[in-house]
Amino acid sequence: MIPYTLYSEVDMTHKLHFGAATLIITGLLGCASAPVEQQAASDAGGPMAPKFEVDPMWPKPLPNHWLLGAVIGVDVDDNDNVWIIHRGGSLEAKEVYATWDPPASECCVPAPPVLQFNSEGDLIGHWGGPGEGYDWPTSNHGIDVDHKGNVWIGGNGRGVAAGATLQPHDESAMGQGAVHDSMILKFSQTGQFLLQVGKPFGGKGSNDLENFKLPAKTLVDPKTNEIYIADGYGNRRVIVLDADTGEYKRHWGAYGNVPDDTQLPPYNPADPLSQQFRTPVHAVVLADDGLLYACDRTNNRIQVFQTDGTYVNEVVIAKNTLGDGATFDVTLSRDPEQKYLYVADGANMKIHVLDRLSLTVLTTFGDGGRQPGQFYAVHSIATDSKGNLYSTETYRGQRVQKFLYKGEAPVTKKDQGTVWPTVSMN
């Protein structure tokens, strides 16, 4: 072994400079090669797909000892502010010691149901809950901020109507008398109540034109000012209303047919595709070219329609998935052509990236777990103007995450797993 003292200061400086130069050159070559690789993949006809990395520092911590329960909705407004809705009632008793009477500890309490963050992760608004003039859902579900800045909320909560009784494990819990959330609500961005369509316990089935039955998610078409509702956990349809008045426009079931509420047998991947939606009809999203994508969650499929309800196409995602299904939510990429479709797969705990027009699955990212970039029941997803993707988790996941858009890249893995940030040489 050569003693360390035999190395002169000049020798060490030379080696350090050489090493630094090597790193710089390697880094430059790496940076230069990425576009070349992407172009080569594109020229060769190989698939390209958006690339994401989780931002483990987003959002910033909440104030006031606030905690999130099951987060069951996310949307991004025209200013790239991120809106979520969660269920504080899903928190465990020991998580909310501060709400006990007397308080059992100094922490914690449920956050207000509706929270608004800016793109940096700062909390900039909060409101929600029961109030005068409207019926707040017993189990809020889904949030949509429309082109006018209005905030729409659905719900999938059961309950017991006045004068009725409900026994434990009552199989009629999906029936008319036990479905409280038969309405959708419209608010201003500051929480001012604007409109309610439907009445609690009012749903009469998938062809009722006045009420809903556990509506899961909404979206408003800025071109027509019509609101599309994925309706939902009790009904088996997509229904369309005027977004200002709530006036009924049209509705349809699977394949554009009149919806049928006949109870279906349990999903079996070996059976032919069901000719009706299963519950829940969980989400809808509308592309700029007029194609509407609806999540038929426990059938593990997305059906595509024209805005008048004409059936266009469908894709089955993770066909063998049982449990609570593979198609929880769907959203669009933000390039001008909206080339890609993102599908939240709550049961398999990942996000699928599809070519939108061919409905081909290109790749997936995510995995089950508690670390950033992993999921427990990824429930809702949305994209901002920069292409970043936001996800929420229901059940005990209880969080919102941000995935940074890193451009398009060649697809090298079908399942990418956790998309952890790459190490930067700064």
Image: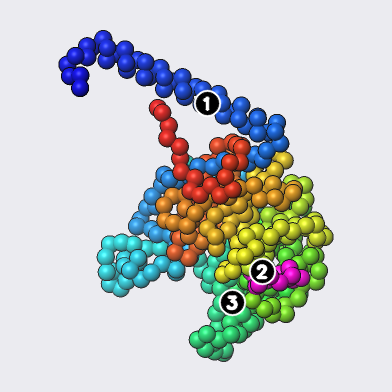
Upstream in the sequence, badge 3 or badge 1? Answer: 1
Vertical relation: 186 (above or below) 236: above
Q: Dot 2 surroundings within 10 Å: few (below 14), some, or many (20 or more)?
A: some
Vertical relation: 362 (above or below) 114: above
- What type of secondary structure mainly makes up the magenta span? loop
Q: Residue at x 60, y 85 (%)?
A: 172
Q: Is residue 58 visible?
A: yes
Instruction: Report the residue that reaches farthest toward the front.
Output: 1
Whether residue 203 sits left or right of residue 426 in the image: it is right
Residue highlighted by disc 1 = 31
Horizontal and vertical percent position of residue 357: 74, 48
| Viewer-side label of 1, 2 | 2
For residue 302, what is the image quadrant? bottom right
Residue highlighted by disc 3 = 180
Say which amino acid is labelled 1.
Answer: Cys
User: Label 3, label 1: how many angstroms apart (C-alpha)?
Assistant: 56 Å
Q: Secondary structure at mark 3?
A: loop
